[in-house]
Image (tube, rainbow, N blue to C red):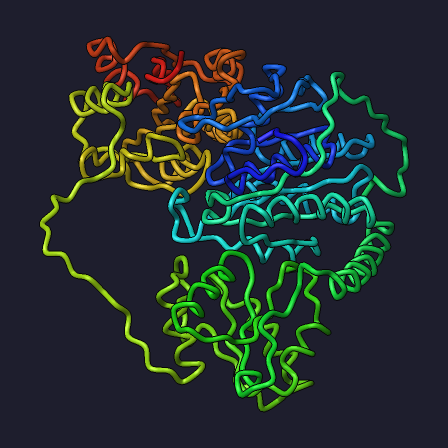
Amino acid sequence: MLGKSGEKVILLGNEAIVRAALESGVQFVSTYPGTPASEIGNLFYELSQSRVRLGQSRVRLGQSRVRLGQGPNRLGKGFLFEFSVNEKIALEAGMGASFSGLKVLVAMKNFGANVCQDALLPLMYSGSLGPMVILVADDPSCHSSAQSEENSRFISYLGHIPMLEPADPAECLEFTKLAFVLSQKFKTPVIIRTTTRVSHQRAIVKLGKFESKIRPPVGEFVKDKEKFVTLPPRVLEMKKELLEKIEKIRDFAEKSSLNRVENERNDINQKIGIITSSVSYLYVLEALKELKTSVPILKLGFFYPLPRKKIERFIRGKKKVLVVEELEPILEKEARELAKEVNPKLEILGKNLLSEVGELKPESITVAIAKLIKKRYNIRQTVYNIRISRRHPQPCPGCPYWLVFGALRQAVNPEKVIWGGDIGCYMLAGTPIIDLQDYLFCMGSSLGIGHGIKKASQQKLIAFIGDSTFFHSGIPALINTVINRSNPLIIILDNRTTAMTGHQPSPGEKIAIEEIVKACGVKNIKVLDPANQKEMIEAVKDFLDKEEVSVIISRHPCLFVK
């Protein structure tokens, strides 16, 4: 991964982003772990901790092993890295580093982008000083994002944030490097938006130059209230400046090779076309190969701001255009608006042929393109008559959560308790095997929602929250529960790691959770090992009937914690 310039290696999309950041001379990296972006933080963490020798060694990232290539150099500590407490804090730390002149990368999954919007939107008004790239990884089909199928492309419109969408690992490298250049040129943060299939796709990547540095960077914050204080009336001037900046970036996008037309020909197929972006572009290529045909393609690397003139030139004179994109039809709506001016008779196809729910598949795109070119096509399917027993996901054998769930079933009647779920391995309590989860929404919400239920009803309630999630967003909810006087039983599952996303460090390794809970005003606190089933059962029975909020800290390390 850290091989010689010009060497071709096979990388994950996430690994290519790390490589691109290093080639760009990144100086500060912050993240909160979240799949499908987790490998970015994992790799930077390993590199920042170990003064890796760039020889034949390897760095372990969860279950994968990343090749470090050849060379006599050491990476050293040429950049600053942190696993932040949550994504908002990660972004704010990156903002401070950028305001001090450093080159910054902040990485998160889609829901993390929601968490940090409070800081992200005003950041766009001030802009960045040191180049700043924000990686946001979406998860169509909810492979690891159970709460909702989010489309983070909308954030670029909400905040006027430049957004690039790579389709494969090679583009992850190219686009990330360009994002640092764009940010430097226009003094604005730039988002790289990936999806699970881009982040976890492997492909050949050609490496560029890489310079290792031994000492961490030193920046300097220079006071400038006109730039860094977003208060009226200056804030309205800042918005006007941001909109002007976006139009300049749009001019840049019009000329950029990231937006390109392919398969232009002077035959009947010139009257039809396909507009696409991200991994959908690869599916389109696969579909065209399957159909043994060629159709003009406008491949968009810039999602925001869109190169409107390039789109107008592409659709002018065409009779039909198919827009291939995952999730909501944003590009399709943009194309329809532009067509009103330059080609009112144009027939635009999109979500009338392709699903708005879940990932797109090459087969469905092949069928859609076949309809576009009026070619008969039947999906070839092989049906295997194999009977497979249905299995549900469950915690690992020997996981300490089994001890907790088993004790709870002995301590109470599950039907007479409301069970609050949260984000972590203990989400699996919602499967039929365990069946101890009555609501699940977002990080920390087991406490916030649980408080609301207790204020509104007389029902007994037990809320689960993990150690990392507690530090992420559980503390404010706990304080709210205390000061507004409700009495749920909260079980903090302290397994000494951020297990679900790859066993990243947890703040609980350095800060005692029980001291935080006590400082929040909780009087009923018990720290125990769930291996002592008798103590666990007695604590649950005792605390569930308390008139004030109670907290049990169930402390037992994950099996994979060394």
Residue 466 horizontal/vertical position (percent): 40, 25
User: What residue is rendered at 27% in x and 28% in y?
Assistant: 395
In the picture provided, is 139 more to the left or to the right than 100?
left
Residue 301 horizontal/vertical position (percent): 63, 58
Residue 238 horizontal/vertical position (percent): 83, 52
User: What residue is rendered at 83% in x and 40% in y?
Assistant: 229
User: What residue is rendered at 57% in x and 27% in y?
Assistant: 69
Count of marks overlaid on the render = 0
- Quarter residue 64 falls in: top left
| Residue 136 position (above or below residue 410) | below
Nearest the eye: 149 or 515? 149
Residue 242 horizontal/vertical position (percent): 80, 55
Q: Residue furthest bottom?
A: 345
- Quarter residue 263 falls in: bottom right
In the picture provided, is 196 more to the left or to the right than 124?
left
| Residue 19 position (above or below residue 167) | above
Nearest the eye: 319 or 293? 293
Quadrant that contains the N terminus: top right
Can residue 482 be seen in the rendering of this structure? no
- Quarter residue 345 falls in: bottom right
Nearest the eye: 117 or 232? 117
In the picture provided, is 523 more to the left or to the right than 272?
left
| Residue 377 position (above or below residue 148) | below
Quadrant that contains the C terminus: top left
| Residue 287 position (above or below residue 215) | below
User: What residue is rendered at 79% in x and 41% in y?
Assistant: 128
